[in-house]
Amino acid sequence: AMAVRVLEEEPGFNAGVGSALTRDGTVEVDAAIMDGNGLRVGGIGAVPFLRRPIDLARQVLEDGQHCLLVGDGAWEFARERGHERARPEDMITERSRQKLAAHRAEQGNSGGTVGACAIDAAGHVASATSTGGMTGKRPGRVGDSPLPGCGTYADDRAGAASATGTGEAIMRVTMARVCTDEMRRGATAAQAAAASVRDLAERTGLDAGIICIDARGGIGVA
Ligand code: ASP
């Protein structure tokens, strides 16, 4: 959570401050964190103007009642946990505005989602992902990042993974789960990362990226 929190505050990334804008020019964030020890997970989807998405995802995980909160109910939970709605000018950057303008002119898309995978001395793995989603998305759209097995997954028996790319493709192949399944069958993190990127490309014709860590501490990036 700490690594992702730092990146959310960095305006150059598409997460927290600097998040991609919806087609209406607003910010709606997605994030999740998963603990491979017991498969505990907390996610939030399409939450407007939330500045610290990974903290809220972690609070959903720690609360333990649900795996994913979205929309107004997510804000009610957020306010109970001390979050305040950010002012638009504190999250929207010149760069995110330019990207929306380029998207409207059909020139570009997204990228810049942030993620982290970790392992501790006891061999427990975890994964976290945070994003503003795709530039020009319809308000209410939830991407892959907060969905367990899609953009984020962690299982002590396999490893942990965090994906980036077009969420609609990642969800259809459940990319993070493909990656951790490879590790569960004995692949190294590097092999599993490459295999899951290949699988997504073969099945959807699109590109995506993934970072992962296996239960022995090996790392993979593809
Ligand atoms: N995967 C993110 C989403 O579709 C976007 C990204 O990774 O850039 O919401």
Image (cartoon, rainbow, N blue to C red):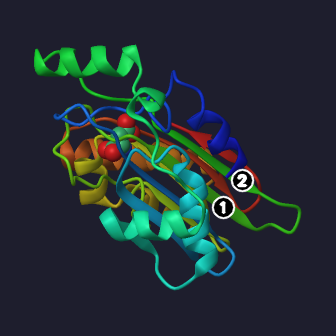
**From the viewer's perspective, is 14 left or right of 96?**
right
**Which residue does the image show at 46% across and 41% down from the upper left?**
86
List x then y, in percent, for residue 156: 67, 72
Badge 1 crowding class, 10 Å Cα cut-off, few under 14, some 14 to 19, many 20 or more, is many
**Front in this rendered view, residue 6 or 112:** 6
Q: How many marks?
A: 2
Residue 124 seen in render: yes
Can you tell which mark lies on residue 118? 2
- The answer to whether the residues at label 2 and label 1 have Cβ atoms under 8 Å apart is yes
Q: Which residue is mark 1?
A: 126
Badge 2 crowding class, 10 Å Cα cut-off, few under 14, some 14 to 19, many 20 or more, is many
List x then y, in percent, for residue 155: 61, 71
Image quadrant of ligand 1? top left
| Inter-mark Cα distance, 2 to 1 | 5 Å
Give above or below for 190 relative to 108: below
Q: Is mark 2 within 8 Å of ligand 1?
A: no
